[in-house]
Amino acid sequence: MELAVFLISLFALLPLGIPIAFILLICCAILMLFMGNFDASIIAQQTVAGTNSFALMAIPFFMLAGEIMGRGGLSRRIVDFANILVGRVRGGLGYAAIIASMIFAGLSGSPVADASALGAIMIPMMVAKGYDRGTSTGLICAGAMIAPIIPPSVPMIVLGSAVGVSIGRMFMAGIVPGVLIGMGLMALWFFIVRKHDYHDTVTYTKEETAKILKDSLPALFMPVLIVGGIRLGIFTPTEAGAFACVYALFISMFVYREVKPSDLLDIAIESGKGTAIVMFIVGAATAVGWLITVAQIPAQFAALLGPVAHQPILLLIIINIFFFFIGMVMDLTPNLLIFGPVIFPVIIAAGIDPVYFGVLMVFNLCLGLITPPVGTILYLGCSVGQVTFGRLVKSILPFLMVEFTMLFLFILFPALIRVPMNWFIG
């Protein structure tokens, strides 16, 4: 009964437009009242305690690093490098957008940062070459879904800290799936180019190529150093976030010289605002998670899924269908924090690798960012790409279908994630 009370109160409040952190706290209060043990001080204590985590310190570090990179010109240099690789191919700007998304994913770990930074550069370039504006924006938004999969991933940090799964192992598990998603988008783009008869190419002289390569190397080294440092045990994911800040600041101020000391206050304020929003949601969701555990909702959920617990693939399909619908109406972070602690005990009891499942969960719930009615990245894409919401939804559908196909393949063939994960972990 507690599970029904929680879900009914949650979905009743979501359409009212109340900030999600306050919705979670209200749901917490409603559930406590239903259970007959309401105490506002406990909600406050659990909310504060939820943000008191060493692993979660990585979030403000990576958000600050992302803000520095956005001001420091790293995204533009990544786009230039991607154009060198595939610009000569027919429809090269589209391929370059996907490759740039894959590289930028290793810098930011945030789909919002990916879509906003690359969209502002790539969409005007693509439209100038004759691409449809809706298709171009749809490609950028779909490519941004790679950011939470390839490390460093802020959603993986949130989920790992909530369910007690190794964040470092999840990082290693996300590398190959992220590349495969990018390859799937490239395969679709191959057919779109021929359907719309695009013939654009981007070419550079030898001198321009050499200059771009030299200029982009410092930016390209950053994801290599972060992933390599974690893989070799040089630093933890949290320490990797601190390293990312120092490295991004050094490159932006002393190599590219696009960030001045006078810019640092604005950068700190903007990253502080973003961090405050995320951490408030984390704290509120932690309070809900504590109460969910007290109410034994995970046990109720396990009993509900009991008949299919001995069939891992069927269990994964059912859970991922649930994730798809919940992702359509609620944002990524609260979904991870609320449903992670509820579902992971069921997954572990069924003998499914929790690291593998964590990658599936992050990817599935991220797809909610590009599906209506919530679709945070869709609204961002409308702003950056200057297209209507309806037009963007129609344009993004083929890309969304490719990503759902990739998700289904990951479910049917766990080795696509587990084998390379084991290889990277060693």
Image: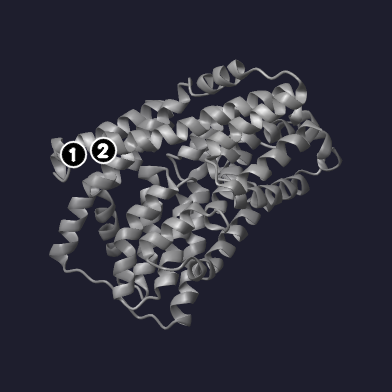
How far from the left and from the top, in percent, is residue 379? 46, 57
How far from the left and from the top, in percent, is residue 126? 33, 70
Q: Which element is circle 1 on?
A: helix
**How busy is the neighbourhood of tag 1: few (under 14 within 10 Å), some, or many (20 plus)?**
few
Left or right: 104 with respect to 393? left
**Residue located at (26% from left, 40% from top):** 68
In the rendered structure, which amino acid carries the disc numbered 1?
Answer: Asp
Residue 183, numbered circle: none
How far from the left and from the top, in percent, is residue 78? 29, 54
Quarter-wise, where is residue 204 in the image?
Answer: bottom left
| Alpha-carbon span between mark 1 and mark 2 | 6 Å
Left or right: 200 with respect to 363? left
Compared with 370, 150 (above or below) is above
Task: Please give the residue where the numbered disc 1 appears in the rendered image.
Answer: 263
Compared with 349, 213 (above or below) is below
Q: Which element is circle 2 on?
A: helix
**Colouring convention used in this rendered image of the protein:** one colour
**Residue located at (74% from left, 34% from top):** 346
Residue 372 visible, this orientation:
yes
- Label 1–label 2 contact, CB within 8 A: yes
Q: Nearer the viewer, residue 146 or 277?
A: 277
In the rendered structure, which amino acid carries the disc numbered 2?
Answer: Ile
Quadrant assignment for the N terminus: top right
Residue 267, numbered circle: 2
Quarter-wise, where is residue 360 in the image?
Answer: top right
Quarter-wise, where is residue 224 in the image?
Answer: top left
Compared with 226, 71 (above or below) is below
Left or right: 320 with respect to 112? right
Residue 86 visible, this orientation:
no
**Residue located at (34% from left, 56% from top):** 118
**Residue located at (49% from left, 63% from top):** 185
How far from the left and from the top, in percent, is residue 90? 36, 76
